[in-house]
Amino acid sequence: MEEKIRPGYAKFDLDEPALNLTLNEGGDMTGGIDHLEIQVSSTDDVLSIKQRLKQAGLVTFDEMDTTCCYARQDKIWVTSPDGHRWEVFVVKADADEMSGTGRNTDN
């Protein structure tokens, strides 16, 4: 298990079962959930999922090469038909700062 604890942020990345649980302090919530995330292995995976979402008629928003949640990431955002915001991302490197909010609302 890998863990990262910073002010207002905690991440627990388990190998078995494969699970990345990340908790962020604050933010706007709808129905108790700010947003949901899917972590993938590469930028190519992020872009492949983006294409599948667009083919399904969903609007996506890109945030490539961004710093968020103490990590350098490539990510996309989409809002599901039931109104939940989803983030699909790959971690490219650790970062020393929190930076971006990880909360895009322009979907």
Image (tube, rainbow, N blue to C red):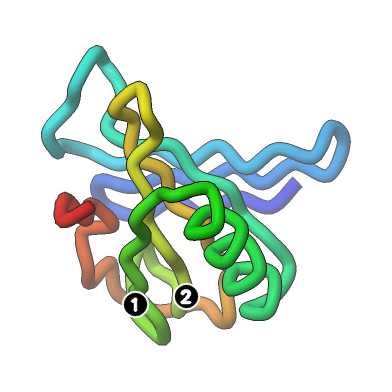
The x, y position of residue 29, in whole percent, is 18, 26
Q: Quadrant of residue 23?
A: top left
Give amino acid for label 2.
Gln
Give amino acid for label 1.
Thr
- Placement of 82 over or under 37, stated as above or below: above
Question: Residue at horizontal 26%, vertical 16%?
Answer: 32
Near-viewer residue (2 or 26): 26
Near-viewer residue (77 or 4): 77
**Residue 44 marker:** none
Near-viewer residue (47 or 74): 47
Q: Secondary structure at mark 2?
A: strand
Q: Secondary structure at mark 1?
A: strand
Q: Is residue 36 rendered to the left or right of residue 98?
A: right
The x, y position of residue 99, in whole percent, is 22, 72
Question: Residue at horizontal 56%, vertical 81%?
Answer: 93
Q: Are discs 1 and 2 less than 8 Å apart at CB?
A: yes
Residue placed under numbered mark 2 in the picture: 73
**Residue 67 marker:** 1
- Placement of 102 over or under 23, stated as above or below: below
* Sequence-earlier tag: 1 or 2: 1
Q: Quadrant of residue 100?
A: bottom left
Q: CA distance from mark 1 to mark 2?
A: 6 Å
- Placement of 28 over or under 100, stated as above or below: above
